[in-house]
Image: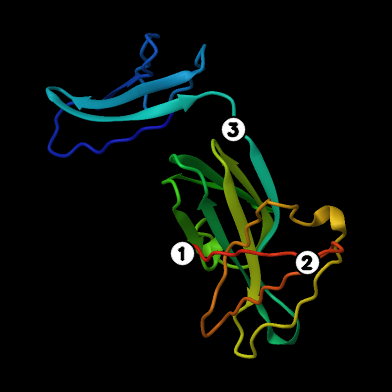
Amino acid sequence: FSGSAQAANCTQALAYDWDFGDGSAHVQAAQASHAYAANGTYQWTFKASSGATVGTKSGTLVVGDLPPNLWMLPLVHTPGDKGAQWRSALTVINTGDADSTVILSYTDSAGTSTQGYTLSAGAFLRWEDATQDLFLLTGDTYGALQVFSDAGLVVSTRIYTGSAAGSYGQSFYGVSAADAVGNSAWGMVPDLLNSSQFRTNVGFLNFGDATAYVTYSMLS
């Protein structure tokens, strides 16, 4: 825990107080370390005072095990061959019927940056240049994304080049019948786009030996 304050027109030195919200002893210092004995939600309070003048800041801290997570490779903001400027767009969609807590962590050679959000049911978040727009990094970077969530999410990344020459052609890996969407099942293709920069092509392949009827819906 780290706090700070600036005193204006005060004649006495600043005093600090941390209340960790779990009934433990307070710490009278600007910086403090504290270990919670049990999982739970705690209301912390930081006070800075000079004589009778007191400033207070408080917040909520959730202590517990990390929710299920997903690793995705890579996120990029780098130059490439033939003048390409590679960027990674990132989309996160809450497909559930309740709010979801989402924690996004990006790790590169310089360290780890983390951002957290509450995503409403059926809502989505999108960052066109994720390392810069979401994690507020500057300069070239290449790393991995880790996604934590307490509910089901659809997460997709799209690597593209922002150069005037446009994107290069892409190839698709082969798939087997085991990869197909089964009878009466459904699949999701996230992050469909149709703009001056992108377009998305969608195709269907019947792996079976009988006629297949496909129903598709556009969700926006």
Q: Which residue is mark 1?
A: 220
Q: Is residue 179 left or right of residue 76?
A: right
Residue plotted at (42% across, 27% down): 61
Q: Depth-wise, is mark 3 or mark 1 nearer the camera? A: 1
Give the Cα distance between marks 3 and 1: 27 Å
Q: How is the image coloured?
A: rainbow
Q: Nearer the viewer, residue 182 or 190?
A: 182
- Measured from the top left, where is residue 143 in percent x and y? 69, 56
The residue carrying pointer 3 sits among few (fewer than 14), some (14 to 19) or many (20 or more) residues within 10 Å by Cα, namely few
Residue 65 in the image: above or below residue 69: above
* x and y, in percent, of residue 26 in the image: 36, 13
> Along the polypeptide, which appears first: circle 1 or circle 2?
2
**Residue that protrudes farthest toward the front in the picture:** 210
Pointer 1 with pointer 2, Cβ within 8 A: no
Residue 36, position as x, y percentages in the image: 50, 16
Alpha carbons under labels 1 and 2: distance apart:
29 Å
Identify the secondary structure beneath mark 3. Answer: loop
The three-letter amino acid code for the residue at tag 2 is Thr
Q: Residue, x 15% and y 22% (percent of image)?
A: 51
Amino acid at dot 3: Pro
Marking on residue 67: 3
Question: Which numbered marker is on residue 211?
Answer: 2
Q: Residue at x 35, y 23 (%)?
A: 44
For disc 1, the neighbor class at 10 Å (few under 14, some 14 to 19, many from 20) is few
Q: Are marks 2 and 3 in contact (CB under 8 Å)?
A: no
Indicate which disc, 3 or 1, sits on the residue closer to the N terminus: 3
Q: Secondary structure at mark 1?
A: loop
